[in-house]
C-alpha cells in the first residue's frame, strides 16, 4: 500500500467515523457508489487530502472516473504539484 492510498483510507475512516475502514477498505473501493460520499463530504475529503499530502489538486484535471477507485485516485494525486508555502509578509 502506498502512502497516498493509506492517507486516503485514513481520511475516509475519519470522515465516516469508522476507524476500521482504514484497514478494511480495498484499494479498489468506489468513493462515489461504494461509500456514497455526498458533495459536502467530497469537498471536505479533497481539502483534507490537499492538507495531508501537501499538494494542490488541479480540479480541472480531476476526472469523475478517478473517484471510482482509491488506487486510481491515489495515482492521480501522486501527479499533483507540491503546495507552495505562503509568501512571507512584507
Image: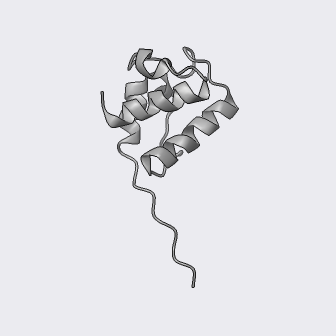
Residue 79 position, x and y percent, is 35, 45
**Residue 87 sits above or below residue 14 on the image:** below
In screen coordinates, is 25 left or right of 45? left
Vertical comparison of 86 with 68: above or below: below
**Farthest bottom residue in view:** 90
Quarter of the view holding residue 73: top left
User: Would you say 13 lies left or right of 39 here?
Assistant: left
Q: Which of the image's four quarters has the C terminus?
A: bottom right
How many dots with numbers?
A: 0
In the rendered image, the residue lying farthest to the left is: 1
Colour scheme of the rendered structure? one colour
Q: Is residue 66 visible from the viewing direction of this image?
A: no
Q: Is residue 66 left or right of residue 71?
A: right
Report x, y in % for residue 10.
Answer: 47, 30
Say which residue appears at 45% left-offset and 23% top-offset.
22
Residue 39, image quadrant? top right
Point 39% across, 38% down: residue: 76
Q: Residue at x 62, y 24 (%)?
A: 37
* Residue 66 spot, x, y in % from top left: 46, 29
For the N terminus, the quadrant is: top left
Expressed as whole percent of the image width and height from the top left, the position of residue 61 reads 47, 43
Q: Which residue lies furthest to the front in this view?
A: 19
Is residue 46 depicted above or below 81 in this figure? Answer: above
Asked whether the viewer can see residue 76, the reply is: yes
Q: Quadrant of residue 41?
A: top right
Amino acid at each position: 500500500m502506498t502512502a497516498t492510498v493509506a492517507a486516503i483510507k485514513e481520511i475516509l475512516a475519519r470522515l465516516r467515523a469508522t476507524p476500521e475502514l482504514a484497514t478494511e477498505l480495498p484499494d479498489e473501493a468506489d468513493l462515489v457508489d461504494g461509500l456514497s460520499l455526498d458533495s459536502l463530504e467530497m469537498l471536505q475529503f479533497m481539502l483534507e487530502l490537499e492538507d495531508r499530502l501537501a499538494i494542490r489538486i488541479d480540479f480541472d484535471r480531476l476526472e469523475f472516473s478517478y473517484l471510482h477507485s482509491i488506487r486510481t485516485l491515489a495515482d492521480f494525486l501522486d501527479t499533483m504539484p507540491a503546495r507552495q508555502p505562503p509568501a512571507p509578509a512584507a
